[in-house]
Amino acid sequence: MNKLPQITLAFWVMKICATTLGETAGDLLSMTLNVGYAVSSMVLISVFLVTLLGQLFSRRYHPMLYWLVILSTSTAGTTMSDFMDRTLGLGYAAGSAILIGILLLTFLVWRLSGNPLDVTRIKNRTGEIYYWVAILFSNTLGTALGDYLADDSGLGFAGGALLVGSAIALVVLARYWTRIPGVVLFWVAFVLTRPFGATLGDVLTKPHEKGGLDFGTIGSSAVLGGVLLVLVLMATWYQKREPRQVLEMS
């Protein structure tokens, strides 16, 4: 049972693209279409559950299905974070602190269950469920952190993206120059790519007077969706080609 992609540079490029699209698409539904955070959260969590069930009951790795689940966790995480921070009035700092606690609790329960946190060793459905729960709250936390950096820290959208991008670069250096366990660095990078996507999404969608490029949620979502679709189709083509290469070598 190996239904997860290999952790390569392509994985992280697609992750950033998916999380940025999750930010713009979530804002498109909740704000541009004026659906509201609570209703948007329910709709997008329902989409997440439907795609997740498809992923859990599949027997092998399907790039299109996998990245649909990642995208649905990103969009659901955006509206869940906005509901906590804005509708409930918790604020970005308090919302982030609560989500950090939930994520750490998820990892603790996951570890106590006897299933490895290493994403390259997830071999049963229980471990896969913990994996997706951690991803959902990682993306929700990343949204709250990104909004905090962009709105409350004084850095602005571009400054927030630069700070998070620098932190990601440090994680990459730590991967090759330190003995920090790879599983720790993976989840740190996974969380950080979400606020990077959130701040990058704000850079793309917000008006010029707020420091953005004013592409709007519709235009930005369309472009990002197209880019992600091309990358997923390339991954699907490569996956179908790889078994043939193995057979030819044998």
Image: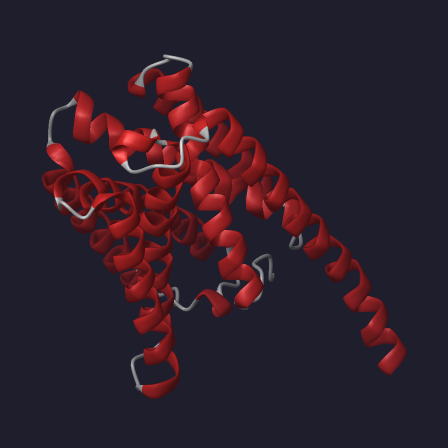
Residue 108 visible, this angle: yes
| Along the line of sight, the residue nearer the viewer: 115 or 170 | 170
| Along the line of sight, the residue nearer the viewer: 182 or 56 | 182
Q: Quarter of the image holding residue 154?
A: top left
Quadrant of image for the N terminus: bottom right
| Residue that protrudes farthest toward the top in the picture | 34
Q: How many labels does the image show?
A: 0
| Drawn side of residue 211 relative to residue 218, left or right | left
Quadrant of image for the C terminus: bottom right
Residue 250 visible, this angle: no
Q: Which x, y percent locates residue 190?
A: 37, 58
Q: Which x, y percent locates residue 26?
A: 40, 29
In the rendered view, how is the structure colored?
secondary structure
Q: Quarter of the image holding residue 207?
A: top left
Up-down relation of residue 48 to residue 111 (above or below) = above
At 34% from the left edge and 31% from the top edge, which residue is drawn? 206
Q: Which x, y percent locates residue 133?
A: 37, 46
| Drawn side of residue 1 relative to residue 100, left or right | right
At 35% from the left edge and 16% from the top edge, which residue is drawn? 39
Up-down relation of residue 237 to residue 50 (above or below) = below
Q: Which x, y percent locates residue 97?
A: 13, 46
